[in-house]
Image (cartoon, helix red, strand yellow):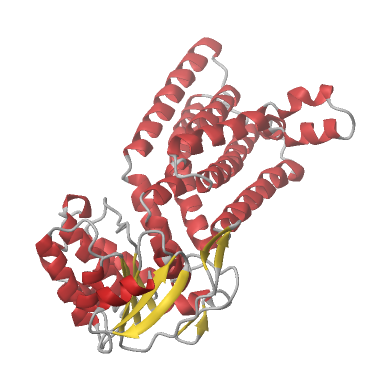
C-alpha cells in the first residue's frame, strides 16, 4: 500500500505480511513512515492505494471488524487524565466490544499483566510517566486482541521504565502478534523477532532477527 | 448500540464534571434570574417572551464555550486517535458528544422552568407561547450545539472552535438583516436562514412545521458534516 498527502509521499508501495505470534520491529529514523504505516494498520488512516487486511478483514471495507482485533498504543500515549485507571480501562474495554459482565475481569486481567493493579483507583492525571505508559498498554490489551501495536513505546521513559516496558513487550510475544515501532536500533534488537527497515517511506528490508546477527551493520548498509 | 450508550455515559461524565459546565450554568442562571426579577417587578405581566429572547442570546453566547472542547480537546490530547481506532462508528462518537452537550443545556432550560411555575402560581399566563417558547429553545439549542460540535471537529484549538461557532451563530442570527441588499432569490435564502426569524413565531405561540424543520434540518446537516470530517480524516 501507499500513502500520499498531496504531492508528499509518506509511504511508497509497502508490501508486508505479519505472522501470528511474532514481534515485528519497525525500524527507521524519524519521518521514515513508521507512524503512517501503523496508523494505516490500525485504521486511523486509509491507504491512498492498496489494501490492508487484519485477521482477514479489510481495514477500510470492514473497518469495525478489523479494529476488533487490534490493541493500539499511539506514540503520544493519549489517556483521559480526569478518569481513574479502572474507569478508563473499563471504558476502553466496552467500546472495544467486551460485554458489561466481562468488563471487570478484563480490566483486572489487563491491569495484572501490565502491573497497574495497585493504581486502578488512582486518577490517571496524577500518575508518573512510567505508570501512564503501562496504563496505555493495559488499554491496548483489555479486550485481548490478536494484534498489539505499539508506536515508540519507550519514548520519554527513564532507563528503568524502558527495561520494564521492553520486558512487558517480550511477555506479549506468542500470545499476541506484536508490532513495535522505534527509531532506536537497540530497542528493536531487544524485543523483535523480525525487523522491517523503513527509510523515506520505503520498505528497504524485512529480516528475521535470528538471521541478522549484526542489525547495526545491516541498517548502515541499507541507509 | 451498547457502545453508543458507553460513549454517551463517558461524555456525560466529562461534561457534568467540567468546570466550564458549571461556569456556564452559573452565568446562565444568574443572568436569567436577574432579568426575570426585573421584568416581573417592572411590567407585572405574566409572560416569558422577554425571558425567551434573553435565553436565545445567552445560548448564542454560551453554547460555543460548551461545545469548544468536544473534539478540539480530543485532538489536542490525541485521545481522538484512541476513539477512531476502536471498533465503533464515527457517527456514534458525534452523537454521544452532541447528546451530552444537549443534556446540559436541557438541564439549564429545565432550571429556568421555575419562572414558568412562578408565573403559573401567582398569575394567569397564556401557556401557548410558553410551551412554544420552550420548544423553540430546545430546537435552537440542538442546532447551536450541532454547529458548535462541527466547528470543534475542525480544529485542535478550543478558542478557534469557540470563535468559529460564535461567528456562524452571529451570521445566522443576522442573516435576514442583509437580505434587502441581495438580489432575488438570494434575498429569500437569507431570510430563511435567519435564526431569529424561525424563533420568534414559536415565542408568540405560533408553531409552524417549517420553523421546526429549519432547526431539525440544520441539526442533521451539521452532525452529518461532523461525521464526514471524522471519517475523511
Question: Toward which corner of the image does residue B143 lie, by quadrant?
Answer: top right
Which residue occupies the foreground of this view, B162 or A60?
Answer: A60
Q: Is residue B47 left or right of residue B93?
A: right
Residue A130, placed above or below residue A195: above
Residue appearing at x 25%, y 70% in the figure:
A185
B85 in relation to B98, above or below: below
Of B113 and B146, nearer the camera is B146
x then y, percent, for residue B120: 51, 30
At 28% from the left and 62% from the top, the residue drawn is: A88
In terms of depth relative to the viewer, which is nearer, B128 or A18?
A18
In the displayed orientation, state which residue is furthest to the front: A221
Of all residues, the one furthest to the top in this rendering is B42
Question: Residue A171: where, in percent of width, then height?
Answer: 19, 81
Is residue B5 in view?
Answer: no
Residue that appears at 35% across and 80% down: A147
Q: Which residue is at the far right?
A: B184
Would residue A97 appear left or right of A129 to someone viewing this image? right
- Where residue A180 sits, quadrant-wise, is bottom left
Q: Is residue A6 left or right of residue A38?
A: right
Number of labels in the image equals 0
Which residue is more in the foreground, A83 or B140? A83
Could you tell me residue B216's position as x and y percent?
66, 48
Q: Left or right: where does residue A109 sit relative to residue B182? A: left
Amino acid at each position: 500500500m501507499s500513502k500520499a498527502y498531496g504531492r508528499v509521499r509518506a509511504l511508497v508501495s509497502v508490501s508486508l505480511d505479519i505472522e501470528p505470534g511474532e514481534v515485528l520491529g519497525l525500524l527507521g529514523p524519524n519521518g521514515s513512515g513508521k507512524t503512517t504505516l501503523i496508523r494505516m494498520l490500525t485504521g486511523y488512516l486509509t491507504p491512498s492505494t492498496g489494501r490492508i487486511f487484519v485477521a482477514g478483514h479489510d481495514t477500510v471495507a470492514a473497518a469495525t471488524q478489523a479494529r476488533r482485533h487490534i490493541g493500539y498504543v499511539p506514540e503520544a500515549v493519549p489517556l483521559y487524565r480526569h478518569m481513574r485507571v479502572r474507569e478508563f480501562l473499563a471504558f476502553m474495554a466496552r467500546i472495544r466490544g467486551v460485554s458489561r459482565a466481562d468488563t471487570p475481569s478484563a480490566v483486572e486481567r489487563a491491569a495484572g499483566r501490565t502491573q497497574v493493579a495497585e493504581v486502578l483507583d488512582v486518577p490517571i492525571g496524577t500518575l508518573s510517566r512510567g505508570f501512564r505508559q503501562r496504563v496505555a498498554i493495559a488499554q491496548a490489551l483489555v479486550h485481548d486482541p490478536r494484534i498489539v501495536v505499539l508506536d515508540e513505546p519507550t519514548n520519554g521513559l527513564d532507563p528503568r521504565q524502558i527495561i520494564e516496558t521492553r520486558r512487558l513487550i517480550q511477555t506479549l510475544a506468542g500470545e499476541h502478534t506484536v508490532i513495535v515501532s522505534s527509531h532506536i536500533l537497540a530497542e528493536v534488537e531487544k524485543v523483535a523477532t523480525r525487523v522491517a527497515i523503513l527509510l523515506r517511506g520505503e520498505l528497504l528490508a524485512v529480516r528475521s532477527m535470528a538471521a541478522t546477527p549484526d542489525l547495526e551493520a545491516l541498517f548502515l548498509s541499507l541507509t | 448500540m451498547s457502545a453508543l450508550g458507553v460513549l454517551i455515559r463517558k461524555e456525560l461524565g466529562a461534561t457534568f464534571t467540567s468546570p466550564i459546565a458549571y461556569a456556564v450554568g452559573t452565568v446562565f442562571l444568574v443572568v436569567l434570574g436577574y432579568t426575570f426579577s426585573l421584568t416581573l417587578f417592572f411590567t407585572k405581566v405574566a409572560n416569558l417572551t422577554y425571558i425567551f429572547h434573553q435565553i436565545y442570546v445567552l445560548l448564542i453566547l454560551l453554547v460555543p464555550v460548551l461545545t469548544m472542547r468536544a473534539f478540539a480537546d480530543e485532538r489536542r490530547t490525541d485521545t481522538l486517535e484512541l476513539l477512531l481506532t476502536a471498533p465503533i462508528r464515527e457517527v456514534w462518537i458525534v452523537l454521544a458528544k452532541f447528546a451530552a452537550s444537549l443534556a446540559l443545556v436541557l438541564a439549564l432550560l429545565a432550571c429556568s422552568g421555575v419562572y414558568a411555575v412562578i408565573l403559573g402560581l401567582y398569575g394567569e399566563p397564556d401557556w401557548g407561547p410558553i410551551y412554544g417558547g420552550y420548544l423553540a429553545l430546545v430546537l435552537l439549542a440542538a442546532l447551536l450545539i450541532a454547529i458548535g460540535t462541527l466547528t470543534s471537529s475542525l480544529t485542535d484549538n478550543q478558542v478557534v472552535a469557540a470563535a468559529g461557532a460564535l461567528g456562524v451563530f452571529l451570521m445566522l442570527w443576522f442573516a435576514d438583516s442583509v437580505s434587502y441588499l441581495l438580489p432575488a432569490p438570494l434575498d429569500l435564502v437569507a431570510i430563511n436562514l435567519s435564526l431569529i426569524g424561525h424563533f420568534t413565531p414559536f415565542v408568540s405561540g405560533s408553531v409552524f412545521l417549517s420553523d421546526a424543520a429549519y432547526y431539525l434540518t440544520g441539526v442533521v446537516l451539521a452532525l452529518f458534516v461532523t461525521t464526514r470530517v471524522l471519517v475523511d480524516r
